[in-house]
Image (spheres, rainbow, N blue to C red):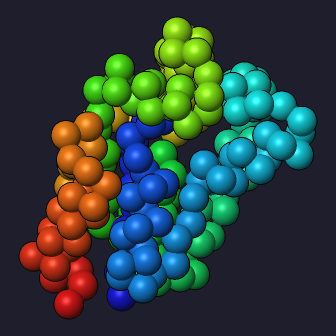
């Protein structure tokens, strides 16, 4: 039975790689980002506005956290991409995606069809909010500390398939899967 969690900041490729990894392994895939975007849609706000709401009312983060924790307790053979999945599913193989800020924001601008300068400012604000909330709510001073994770991949250097192959090779080496 394998539980794999993927952490990374916006634009690192968590969702794309997570979906491909789950498909390759025949595992379920769950995305915290999808859940957050759906919550924002229901509230008729964008993701940045949802982060602002989350700064003053923990219930928005709590909904996502509860869903991730429940999923982790009741399932096996899955890949979850969510910033705090490693925290809420402690028995998982924890993967950290890192990528240069400029590369990440270029990816986001292309994906969302937005101006790069706007994306950079929005991303800085969003990440500041995330860091502040996770420190305040969970006493995690640095969610990007690589010490939280079992394996780190620089997704700015490799293609999607190379990233997935690297993770697959590592989980086989560690005998997490056969």
* Near-viewer residue (138 or 154): 154
Left or right of 118 in this view: 161 = left
Q: In which quarter of the image is residue 74?
A: bottom right
Side of 143 relative to 127 (left or right): left
In the picture shown, does residue 158 fall above or below 88? above
- Tell me the quadrant of the picture where the C terminus can be found: bottom left
Say how many tags the image has.
0
The quadrant of the picture occupied by the N terminus is bottom left
44 sits to left or right of 59: right
Residue 93 position, x and y percent, is 30, 66
Task: Determine the residue positioned at 75% across, 42% down.
Answer: 60
User: Does the rendering let one see residue 132?
Assistant: no
- Foreground residue among 91 and 154: 154
Instruction: Name the residue nearer the viewer: 19 or 31.
Output: 19
- Which residue is drawn at the image coordinates 34% and 27% (left, top)? 103
Q: Residue at x 60, y 49 (%)?
A: 33
Place residue 165 in its image quadrant: bottom left
| Image coordinates for residue 45, horizontal then vertical, percent | 83, 31
Q: In this view, does 49 lie above or below 158?
A: above
Residue 120 visible somewhere in the drawing: yes
Q: Tell me residue 99's x, y (percent).
A: 29, 34
Position above or below: 11 against 170 = above
Q: Look at 10% across and 76% down and name the residue there.
A: 173
Decide if residue 35 is on the left or right side of residue 84.
right
Q: Where is residue 144 in the image (x, y as percent from the top left)?
A: 33, 35
């Amino acid at each position: 039975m394998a539980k794999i969690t993927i952490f990374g900041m916006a634009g690192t490729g968590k969702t794309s790689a997570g979906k491909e990894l789950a498909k390759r392994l025949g595992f379920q895939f769950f995305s915290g980002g999808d859940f957050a975007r759906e919550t924002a849609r229901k509230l008729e706000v964008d993701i940045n506005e949802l982060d602002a709401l989350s700064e003053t009312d923990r219930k928005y983060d709590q909904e996502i956290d509860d869903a991730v924790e429940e999923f982790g307790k009741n399932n096996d053979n899955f890949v979850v991409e969510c910033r705090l999945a490693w925290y809420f599913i402690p028995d998982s193989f924890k993967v950290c995606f890192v990528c240069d800020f400029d590369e990440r924001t270029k990816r986001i601008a292309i994906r969302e069809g937005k101006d790069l300068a706007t994306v950079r400012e929005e991303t800085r604000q969003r990440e500041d909010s995330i860091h502040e909330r996770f420190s305040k709510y969970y006493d995690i001073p640095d969610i990007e500390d690589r010490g939280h994770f079992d394996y780190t991949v620089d997704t700015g250097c490799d293609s999607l398939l190379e990233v997935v192959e690297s993770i697959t090779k590592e989980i086989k080496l560690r005998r997490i899967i056969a």
